Amino acid sequence: MAGVDSLAVPSTHRLGAEGFSLDVRVARLPGLFKHLALTLLMAAALVATIELITRASLSETVAYVLDPMRPATTAIGLVFLVLIAFDALFGRRHMGVLVLAPFAVIPALISKQKQIFLSDPLYPTDLLFGRQIVELLPAMVRDRPGTAIAIAVGLVAGVALLTFALRHAWRRFARIGLQGRLVRLAVALPLIAGFVSIMDYNQFSWLRDRLRVIPIMWDQTENYRHNGFLLAFSINVPMANVSTPSGYSLDAIERIASEPLPAGTTHRMKPDVIVLMSESLFDPTRLPNVTLEPDPMPTIRAMQGGNVFSPEFGGMTSNVEFEALTGFSNAFLPYGSIPYQQYIRESLPSLATFFRGEGYVSRAIHPFQKWFWNRGSVYQSFGFDAFASEETMPPMVKRGIFASDESLTGEIIRQADILDDPFFFFAVTLQGHGPYEANRYAHNTIKVTGDLPQADRQVLETYAQGVKEADDNLRRLMDWARERDRETIIVIFGDHLPPLNTVYTSTGFMPQVTASRKGSLDEMKIQHETPLVVWSNKTGARKDIGTISPAFLSYQILKTAGYEHPYYTGFLGTVFERFPVIDRYMLIDRRGRETVDWLRRPKIVSTIRDYRFLQHDMMFGKRHGIDRFFRPQDLPHLPQT
């Protein structure tokens, strides 16, 4: 029986069988305790390693592990149970740590890189678009070549080392007998299942509270800081399941006030509408302690009528796009969720369906591949007639690795000129995408002066040159529109602030390289506002818009075009008049007063409550309100695939 671990070894001797079996059990106990103690030590080391990677700070890692008010002990205990369960499944001591460690450490490494480029850690839903991360690797490699090389070398070495270790372990590690394996599983699996059962953050758990696990869903930075990467990641797994708002029912929807509107009527000839969501468009002259000469955005500055209060920073473009096209809000969805990836599976009202219902040609245009952010499927659900993507568009001139705004503008004009019917175009630019490498432009025409490190100066000059070209092409599009007989409305806005990294801290714009998810009103506006232009070749630029959430762009566009609609101008208009900005953390009312942590309050103001009910009704519920707030043509049937 050498090399076999068992909690019991039955005797084959009839004489003294009970005593012999007991002696064997006692003899095995020290070895078992040693195995369990070593496994516990490995679990602690694995948790500490993961935290050191994600926090990038030894002191913060030590603080997490030693703080009795934080659940490091719980995380270690959970990993310990998983390790012994894996040992039992493989039938070898310590095989669990060899198998589990890579699957725990690699997500931690990815999370740290995501925090560098964006402001958020890794969420479970990020795994749904891993292909996009692969597609963006060339840009990331250019921005951080040293890190990329280190990761590549580390992966190769890690795979080789793991392969060797697994072969060695299978041959040399002590086997676990059948009875020992069953006992380990009998202990570990119920405890793991019990832990999973108390992790629903929508329900209070006395035991979870005693274990110091506190789901902080409204502030994911604090969620990961307090609970640690493993537990916070686990807490977020249910985020794809949207819970029904308390009080939602048919009666609740019927009680929402609505006024009959002559949907679709306009007081003038149907205008063409072009909406440009400009990648990472931001006013770089807002950065303090630096000067940019000449002004990179004179056209936008002259025509700007307000700002978009972006719910994102440095990325997650599709979440801003979701609000702009649907008139729904991310504030009512689980933190970290991505509607395009998780929730859009059937037809949903949008600006595309509205204009299509009015006899417009309704097209989406984006010079990248249609699978990115699941746009191919989502645009179909939104009712676009067609999606002109990289696969179907003529070859685009590039700026770096991204299609230029000049080429995209030319394609918009080309498509518009061949149409006789009125059209609605929703175009997403790509040129402004980070990182902002030194050689993207043959010649930078914007000079940055100020006390900046050379690396930051280069990044800012590259970014500012991109803003200048976006501005130049807006002017080009407006000059084209001025020559047209039909009214043409052009809307341009930025989806979020650019990922300028240390430029923000070097200039003193904000204390961290990424925006805060919560802060004072002034801080939030500085870190989340992007320019908004709404212009018509007949009536000029709107100057009275102010700062608005992307969800209210549909209201602004239809009002500018002279249209009315029960939801987009009626209901959203009512909400807009009270709260032009709706963010997960903060509401901003018409007078500029903020209400912070409003989602945590026991009672939500009725206007916002009804907005939440109606959005849930259309996205996840029974669509009780469809007859009063939408039209039959607002929900086209999806083609069978």
Image: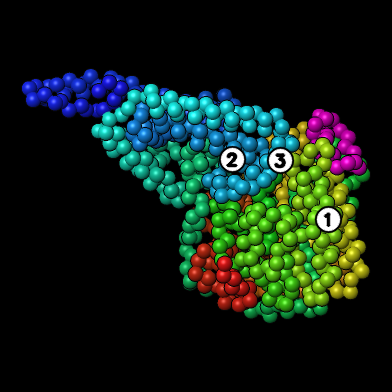
Depth check: give the residue in front, 402 or 223: 402
Total residue callouts: 3
Q: Examine the structure image and report whether residue 447 is included in the region drawn in magenta.
A: yes
Q: Examine the structure image and report whether residue 319 is included in the region drawn in magenta.
A: no
The tag earlier along the polypeptide, 2 or 1, is 2
- In the rendered image, the vertical position of residue 95 relative to residue 471, given as above or below: above
The tag earlier along the polypeptide, 3 or 2, is 2
Question: Could you tell me the amino acid type at mark 2?
Answer: Pro
Do labels 3 and 1 touch, CB within 8 Å?
Answer: no
**Circle 1 sits on which residue?**
407
Q: Which residues are magenta?
A: 441-462
Q: What is the number of the mark on residue 121?
A: 2
**Circle 3 sits on which residue?**
138
Residue visible at 79% across and 38% down?
437
Asked if one can make out residue 489 in the rendered structure from this viewpoint, the answer is: no
Residue visible at 23% across and 19% down?
27
